[in-house]
């Protein structure tokens, strides 16, 4: 009876808030606590905030708690994650929640996860499953209206050497590239509407001062703005959209080992004054001295392969325009040199040297 009085409820909430705040190293708020029977409680309107920034991390309207001296079982009916990126939320999870399971067994079951106000319109109908064991933990999230939803999985070992693995499979759906940029080994700017379809895996090996990353991916990136890839001073030397098909992308211990893919584009424009420089820097054949100041093109096809020794560029592999990279309505503009290898670490370095 005492637990249901105002004084008893205040004492009970204070005890739970203090224990949970210390366990998660976070700020905890609880509106009401229901005592069901010894070892069984129901928490209403639980909010968890980051202790350093006081930013809301997640909230739940109802949490069932079943605990003993050796373990705690949490059943969260609906978990809401506010306007934070998946990577930010998972970093908080790694640093705050996983530390608990090293000495104490915690099992968490989530019925429904709602990701609010993220920069992804398709993050709805989300479900999440969390598995914690003595050696490792795993968070799996599925979302989307499609029959085959997006799938994301984060696993982490608890014992040294610690490794966090981030696995994404879009299952044929398009995901905004900005949503996953933080999980990539380097930040890339390919346009505001760029989307990714495919799969990738990142493994993080945290050290005392730096983290080493292993990364592999295949798939395609649509709606790539060519002026983001081929940057030249402050002027828009090329305009148009393209699709980048990634056949292989491998990074080991923060070092890129191989990039292989194809860039395919439709209609666009390119500055005529830039063509001879582009041909010289990238060792291409300039096949036509067109007179327009801004040259319209009808197709772009470039197969690329990069490794630490340099990269190669190849044009169309079949049809009437074999070897053509950039094509005007009247014929080829730029073509490849099959035996050339560009001795440069990056495309921008090759263009600016």
Image: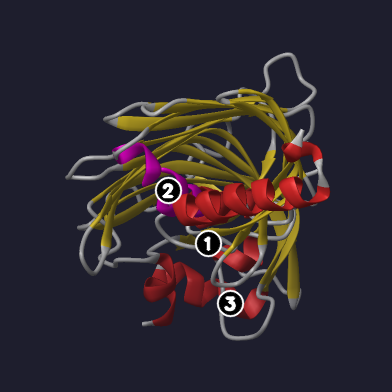
Query: What residue lies at 64% left-to-right and 69% top-to-bottom?
Result: 54
Q: Position of residue 348 (x, y in %)?
A: 44, 72
> From what the image shows, is residue 201 above or below residue 20?
above
Is disc 1 placed on a helix, strand or loop?
loop
Is residue 167 rendered to the left or right of residue 40? left
Residue 334 sits in which quadrant? bottom right
Q: Position of residue 215 (x, y in %)?
A: 35, 44
Is disc 2 placed on a helix, strand or loop?
helix
Query: What residue lies at 72% left-to-right and 29% top-to-bottom?
Result: 126
Q: Position of residue 304 (x, y in %)?
A: 41, 47
- Seen from the viewer's position, the closer of residues 335 and 199 is 199
Marks 3 and 1, Cα distance to the nearest angstrom? 24 Å
Residue at numbered disc 2? 94
Is disc 3 placed on a helix, strand or loop?
helix
Is residue 80 rendered to the left or right of residue 274? right
Q: Quadrant of the C terminus?
A: bottom left
- Seen from the viewer's position, the closer of residues 98 and 275 is 98
Residue 316, labelled with which disc? Answer: none
- Circle 3 packing at 10 Å, graded few (<14), some (14-19), many (20+), is some
- Circle 2 packing at 10 Å, graded few (<14), some (14-19), many (20+), is some
- Is residue 298 in view? no
Marks 1 and 2, Cα distance to the nearest angstrom? 25 Å
- Seen from the viewer's position, the closer of residues 319 and 268 is 268
Q: Residue furthest top?
A: 147
Q: Is residue 7 magenta?
A: no
Marks 2 and 3, Cα distance to the nearest angstrom? 48 Å
Residue 188, labelled with which disc? Answer: 1
Start-end of magenta stretch: 92-102
- Is residue 58 in view? yes
């Amino acid at each position: 009876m005492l637990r249901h009085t105002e004084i008893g409820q205040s004492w009970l909430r204070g005890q739970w808030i203090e224990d949970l705040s210390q366990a998660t190293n976070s700020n905890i708020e609880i509106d009401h606590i229901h005592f069901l029977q010894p070892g069984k409680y129901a928490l209403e309107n639980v909010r968890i905030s980051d202790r350093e920034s006081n930013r809301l991390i997640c909230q739940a309207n109802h949490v069932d708690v079943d605990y003993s001296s050796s373990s705690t079982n949490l059943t969260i009916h609906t978990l809401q994650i506010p306007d934070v990126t998946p990577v930010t939320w998972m970093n908080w999870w790694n640093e705050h929640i996983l530390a608990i399971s090293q000495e104490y067994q915690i099992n968490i079951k989530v019925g429904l996860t709602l990701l609010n106000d993220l920069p992804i319109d398709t993050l709805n109908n989300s479900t999440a499953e969390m598995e914690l064991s003595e050696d490792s933990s795993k968070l799996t999230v599925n979302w989307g209206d499609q029959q085959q939803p997006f799938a994301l999985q984060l696993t982490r070992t608890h014992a040294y050497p610690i490794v966090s693995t981030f696995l994404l499979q879009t299952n044929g759906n398009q995901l905004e590239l900005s949503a996953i940029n933080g999980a990539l080994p380097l930040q890339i700017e390919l346009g505001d509407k760029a989307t990714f379809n495919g799969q990738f895996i990142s493994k993080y090996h945290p050290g005392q001062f730096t983290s080493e990353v292993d990364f592999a991916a295949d798939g395609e990136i649509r709606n790539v703005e060519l002026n983001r890839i081929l940057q030249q001073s402050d002027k828009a030397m090329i305009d148009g959209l393209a699709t980048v098909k990634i056949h292989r992308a491998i990074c080991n211990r923060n070092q890129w080992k191989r990039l292989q893919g194809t860039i395919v584009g439709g209609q666009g424009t390119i500055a005529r004054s830039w063509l001879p420089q582009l041909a010289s820097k990238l060792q291409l054949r300039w096949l036509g001295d067109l007179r327009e100041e801004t040259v319209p093109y009808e197709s772009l096809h470039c197969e690329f392969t990069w490794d630490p020794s340099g990269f190669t560029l190849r044009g169309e592999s079949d049809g009437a325009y074999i070897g053509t990279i950039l094509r005007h309505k009247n014929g080829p503009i730029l073509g490849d040199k099959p035996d050339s290898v560009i001795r440069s670490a990056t495309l921008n370095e090759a263009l600016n040297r």
